[in-house]
Amino acid sequence: MTTENHLRHVQSLPVFPSGAGNIPRLNAVILGEALASEENDFVFPSPEFSRNAHVSSPSEYSDMYKRSVEDPSGFWGDIASEFYWKQKWGKEVCSENLDVTKGTVNIEWFKGGITNICYNCLDRNVENGNGDKIALYWEGNDLGFDDSLTYSQLLEKLANYLKDVGVKKGDAVIIYLPMLMELPIAMLACARIGAIHSVVFAGFSSESLAQRIVDCKPKVVLTCNAVKRGAKVIGLKDIVDAALAESTKNGVSVDVCLTYENKLAVSRENTKWTEGRDIWWQDVVPKYPSTCDVEWVDAEDPLFLLYTSGSTGKPKGVVHTTGGYMVYTATTFKYTFDYKPSDVYWCTADCGWITGHSYVTYGPLLNGASCIVFEGAPTYPDAGRCWDIVDKYKVSIFYTAPTLVRSLMREGTEHVTRYSRKSLRVLGSVGEPINPSAWRWFFNVVGDSRCPISDTWWQTETGGFMITPLPGAWAQKPGSASYPFFGVQPVIVDEKGKELEGECSGYLCIKHSWPSAFRTLYGDHERYETTYFKPFPGYYFTGDGCSRDKDGYYWLTGRVDDVINVSGHRIGTAEVESALVSHPQCAEAAVVGVEHEVKGQGIYAFVTLVEGVPYSEELRKSLVMAVRSQIGAFAAPDKIHWAPGLPKTRSGKIMRRILRKIASRQLDELGDTSTLAEPVVVEQLIALADK
Ligand code: 6R9
């Protein structure tokens, strides 16, 4: 949509109703999803909230938005000037080519600017007089275990150690840690010395970890011996040992495995050890001085790599650079959560995902915020844990995923209402579309109908929020991420790439780059162009479907590629299929996503066995185990559907459209099956549906 049209929508938004106490008190149970039209359902922030917000009205937003797209150098240049730059960037803030037909795709922001993001997160805040402010509160898995670090204390010693063992600017470091404070500490230490961190979510299996080690060849792996999650102890070091052995077999050996001793889980005496390679964090790191010179880097030097799932079996190493990412994550954090220095912020995401990078570590710390790092499971020891933490730390901004909202919803409101939650001011949601009934429960029950919800749509690739409410600026509609952030120009296109105007649905693309756009896929710029820029030349293609309503609000409708979103985790169907077919008794597998009450989507696998192998419960379990051990427990299929054959076209292509319908039991909507090579397989599949 043109900027002009977008702004016209914003300007014609309904004005906030006058008078006090005018937030409609919606009743989640009565209204539920049955509301006649979500599109007409405006939920307003209170006038008081708006008055005090960074952006208080649609017109204030539209002035800022207009400037952000018409004068990006002025808009982003002003914001960037609030950070420390050893040397200022060149004249234009951005140079870009998004059009594959005109040459290589290339995006640069603040090129020539010399800075350091760790310096801006820590030293700058200490120099601004916030050295004694708490940067991180740590809340352990078990009740009663906690800790905290101030901004001055975060300036610690790990960076010196890494330098000493030979990590230099541009070297990769893999971080495989649970949510201990050492995880953000490790990220910041890498950033300080110009090393490229690659955090691997500590729920990934040894094989997935090995795959990432082989791809990015890190100098050092940072981990811990074990972690407690709920009542379970997980031996992370054993997983790392297996991954390192596997990587060595593939020609990549790692010299140093720095291991944090997590005594609360397992003692060092009970940890397997490889002398020479393994080193206890606590034995070496404290010996170093607590100041470490900063390695100044170009705005376009890489900050981190983060692997994410795509539609092929091989994960993609998304590369983010320093300057634009810094400016954008800081700015989106400030405006989207209406952040004020008195806030206490808690994002429940793990640093192993992009949300934990941009909105546990960098965005909040760049703003000098006090943030919570929570090690445990949100329902341990019971379903009230989140609100216990909210009350304990007086959390004012709470950012989570719809899957958690839905799972807590099932446990009943009494787990919520027995806590005060008075400190809460703003709520946030990320990872998947939030269904209106979960939105209402979050709004009414958790937020006592007082706290606006920022439903933030964005991706690993985008680095920061793209379409999101600004909580005081306009009315929200439950389930819609609403409007684009400053500088973001979303367009909805049809299959031919034609831009659609007004009310429409289609594929969501972005015109022009934004500061924290990813710059490439590690070692594979061609795949970067093919996946994201070739489908609709001139645009970045998000992989998401989207519609826009008559008020210009955006409604994200989910992935349109072979990616499943399980509890907000992106999983490629091809990855799960390749794990299944690696099982010696599996001949072929096809995986589709199905609706799941709590997880958003569940994984549904059709499996054809090797000739003569009988179906059995034991085999079902061992197939699920194959996926758990090759990817991680979070990717375990919810359903294995025995399939004597798979529906294929005559050219041998699996018809997933049909499989999706069978998986969701929409058997009367199978559509045209006449192009199938063997139409009878469909009947066989239906017959075996509940076996
Ligand atoms: C940040 C993150 C990205 C995919 C994205 C989309 C889905 C994320 C959403 C949302 C609707 C939201 N998604 N936030 N869909 N509304 N507020 O989750 O990154 O793991 O890369 O996933 O998640 O489908 O394309 P990532």
Image (cartoon, rainbow, N blue to C red):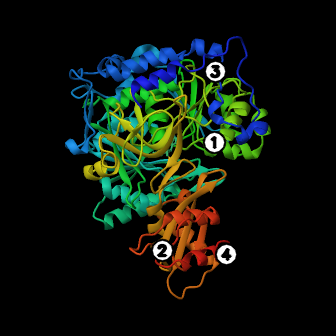
Identify residue type, mark 3: Pro
Q: Which residue is mark 3?
A: 45
- Tell which circle, 4 or 2, labels the residue nearer the N-terminal end: 2
Quarter that holds the C terminus: bottom right
1 and 4 marks in contact (CB < 8 Å): no
- Nearer the observer: mark 2 or 3; the answer is 2
Q: Compared with residue 624, is residue 8 higher up or lower down, i.e. above or below?
A: above
Secondary structure, mark 4, is: loop
Label 1 residue near ligand 1, CB within 8 Å: no
Identify residue type, mark 4: Lys
Label 2 residue near ligand 1, CB within 8 Å: no
Q: Which residue is mark 1?
A: 435
Secondary structure, mark 2, is: loop
Q: Which residue is mark 4?
A: 691
Residue 642 location (% of width, % of height): 59, 75
* Crowd band around label 1 with a 10 angstrom C-alpha radius: few (<14), some (14–19), many (20+): some
Identify residue type, mark 1: Asn
369 and 69: which one is in front?
69
562 and 40: which one is in front?
40
Q: Residue at x 58, y 13 (%)?
A: 52
Q: Which residue is mark 2?
A: 676
Identify residue type, mark 2: Leu
Q: From mark 4 to mark 2, how far is it between C-alphas?
A: 24 Å
4 and 2 marks in contact (CB < 8 Å): no
Tell me if I can see residue 594 in this picture.
yes
Q: Compared with residue 171, is residue 38 higher up or lower down, i.e. above or below?
A: above
Q: Residue furthest bottom?
A: 612
Q: Where, by quadrant of the figure, is residue 190 drawn?
A: top left
